[in-house]
Amino acid sequence: MSGALFGAPTGLLSRLPRSEVSVADLRAAVARRGSAGPDPGLALDVVDGVRGPMLVLTEAGRTTRVLLGELAVQMTRARVAASTDGVSSALASWLARRPVPDPVAAEAGIAVLDWADARQTTLGWRVVVVRDALVVPWRPSGSATLPAVHQVRSQALGRAAGVPGTLRVEGPVGLWSSTAVAGIDTAVLVRPEALLAEMVVRGVRLSDAHVVVTPRRPVACAAAPVARRLVAEAADACAILPWQQLDDLGWA
């Protein structure tokens, strides 16, 4: 858990003293969310456990449990305002990032490129689901069989091929962005030949095309020397690949 899970405050708010979020605050926020109408397919409940009250999420056969006391501490550390609106907003943000159940990934998963290692040196495909304009990664449950995982991934690759986007050409560089939702731009690389064909239509013909991949960011495509310069000047971690090597990438 991190502050980003709750919509971390910025600017002057981050410098103010922490206000303590209590278990009672969270209970009230869960009750308000329930009275506002159920989330489709998602059931929320607070149950009393040995270690204290626990928030239980059930969705498509997947259950997630978290102690309200632990969640309250995490929100306090993230400087969530201990107000009705502050705690409700933080709870909504946390719920939006809840684990993705296997059936949901099978129904709506999209394949994108992501880092396969903590050092951010190796790229791989990952199945994600768009939820409340957020891109949430799918991690197979312990009960998911290998054939089921393969099927989810195959379906996600198929959906990625249909993600709409737009190509902006700036000199020798083509920049592809998803128009569906931010963060799934790399889905276009399941069919890199489509990107190259669009660049030809726009007047850029590359004999040695390379792509510059920054997970969750638009994809740049250019000749090798230009691509290397883009990587050298990039502020975020990124990788450069000849487009032919995209077929060799595994799963993150």
Image: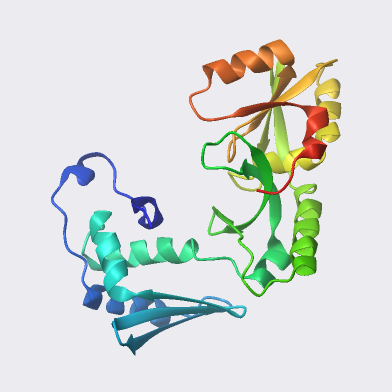
**Nearest to the observer: residue 183 or residue 120:** 120
| Residue at screen point 75% across, 56% down | 156
Residue 21: x percent and y percent?
21, 66
Please, which colouring scheme is shown?
rainbow
**Nearest to the observer: residue 23 or residue 164:** 23
- Report the number of numbered marks: 0
| Residue at screen point 13% across, 51% down | 17
Q: Name which quarter of the figure residue 141 lies in.
A: bottom right
Q: Name which quarter of the figure residue 219 lies in.
A: top right
Residue 124: x percent and y percent?
68, 43
97 vs 9, left or right, is right
Q: Is residue 172 visible?
A: no
183 vs 210, left or right, is left
175 vs 235, left or right, is right
Q: Name which quarter of the figure residue 80 lies in.
A: bottom left
Residue 108: x percent and y percent?
70, 62
Image quarter (top left, top right, bottom left or bottom right) of the N terminus: bottom left
Q: Residue furthest left?
A: 17
| Residue at screen point 75% across, 49% down | 160
Q: Is residue 14 visible?
A: yes
| Residue at screen point 30% across, 87% down | 50
91 vs 83, left or right, is right
